[in-house]
Amino acid sequence: MGPQDGRLVLETLIQGSTVDLFHTAGIAVAPVPASRVAASEIGSHALMASINFGGSVMSGTLGLLVPVGVFELVKQDPARPFTGLAWVQDSVNQLLGRIKSRLLQFQITLQMGLPMCLDDKALRHMAAQGILAAYRFRTLRGEISVTLAGKVDYSKLNYSNQVTFVTEGDIIIF
Amino acid sequence: MAVKKILIVDDSETIRQRVVGALEQAGFATATARDGVEGLVAVEQQAPALVILDVNMPRMNGLDMLEKLDLKTSGLPVLLLTTEVQPSLMERAKKAGARGWMVKPVNLEQLVATVRKVVG
């Protein structure tokens, strides 16, 4: 598989994972056509989080930028509310989990770091390091962005037909 | 009958709040900890009937905490709740005596049903 095909595979995988993640939270999101955008086009939001990852094929940082209006759509128990910053950190963690799970089909494993909040300064730093790709998603309350910074060996994104026997939402009793 | 206490060890505030809410609504008592270090202390102090444990956490991860708990001696049931799906990690948890593996995001009704099944 050539690097260009590998890019498309990763793009599809990130877009699918993001749509699934927000669908689970009851929020409809749609990838913006030709949504790979330049780093300079990424708008900052009040709710931003990132998570580092490492592996032989890919290493870097995944970012998730969400407008406050989208968080307001998340159903919460009024007795036990959580903050938008806690939610966006959990969301970026779950997003990387989904991407990681889908990468197993390509026999690619990732080690996940811990999610952290991202501020404007950290976002600029990430952009300066070189954002490989940024994807935008439309919602009823503004646009979500997902950013990917780091290194990817696109030639290794070869489908291996490896069965992933557990997936999101599964409960396995030993 | 005494109310059974479930300890939730997760660095995500969102997950702690959601799981606590679902378990308390189902009649369980709960306690929480934010990482493996706090989790080990909480197991000593709270004497839970079951532990729900995340894998990726600061200071001490869930698998390291699991191995320190010496489950084969204590018999304390532990269910992992994580985004991880790597078979090698599941195998490590199973070897350490964990009772199950749940992949986030999990349906809360199913989580409660699983907890009921494991604690009896």
Image: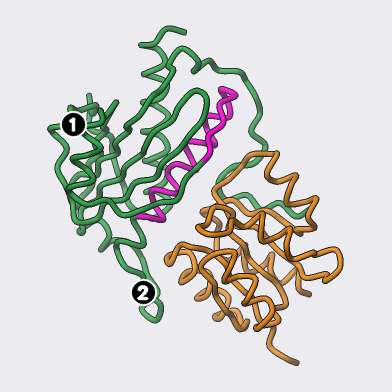
Chain colours: A green, B orange
Q: Which residue is rendered at x = 56% and y = 81% of the image? A: B24
Q: Position of residue B61 (x, y in %)?
A: 59, 56
Task: Read off the residue under disc 2.
Answer: A81
Q: Position of residue A31 (x, y in %)?
A: 28, 34
Task: Read off the residue under disc 1.
Answer: A39
Please state if A17 lies on the left or on the right of B77 as rendered.
left
Q: Nearer the viewer, residue B5 or B113?
A: B5
Residue B65's disc is: none
Magenta span: chief secondary structure: helix
Q: Position of residue A35 (x, y in %)?
A: 23, 29
Compared with residue B101, is residue B11 higher up or lower down, i.e. above or below? below
Q: Chain of mark 1?
A: A
Q: Which residue is rendered at x = 44% and y = 18% of the image? A: A153
Q: Nearer the viewer, residue B31 or B119?
A: B31
Q: Element under label 1?
A: helix
Q: Nearer the viewer, residue B99 or B62?
A: B62
Residue lying at the far top in this picture: please name it: A2
Q: Amino acid at mark 2?
A: Pro
Q: Which residue is rendered at x = 46% and y = 12% of the image? A: A155
How many residues crowd mark 2 within 10 Å: few (<14), some (14–19), many (20+)? some
Compared with residue B30, is residue B106 higher up or lower down, i.e. above or below? above
Q: Nearer the viewer, residue B79 or B61?
A: B61
Q: Position of residue B43 (x, y in %)?
A: 67, 76
Q: Which residue is rendered at x = 43% and y = 67% of the image? A: B13
Residue segment shown in magenta = A89-111
How many residues crowd mark 1 within 10 Å: few (<14), some (14–19), many (20+)? many
How far is mark 1 from mark 2, CA to CA?
Answer: 33 Å
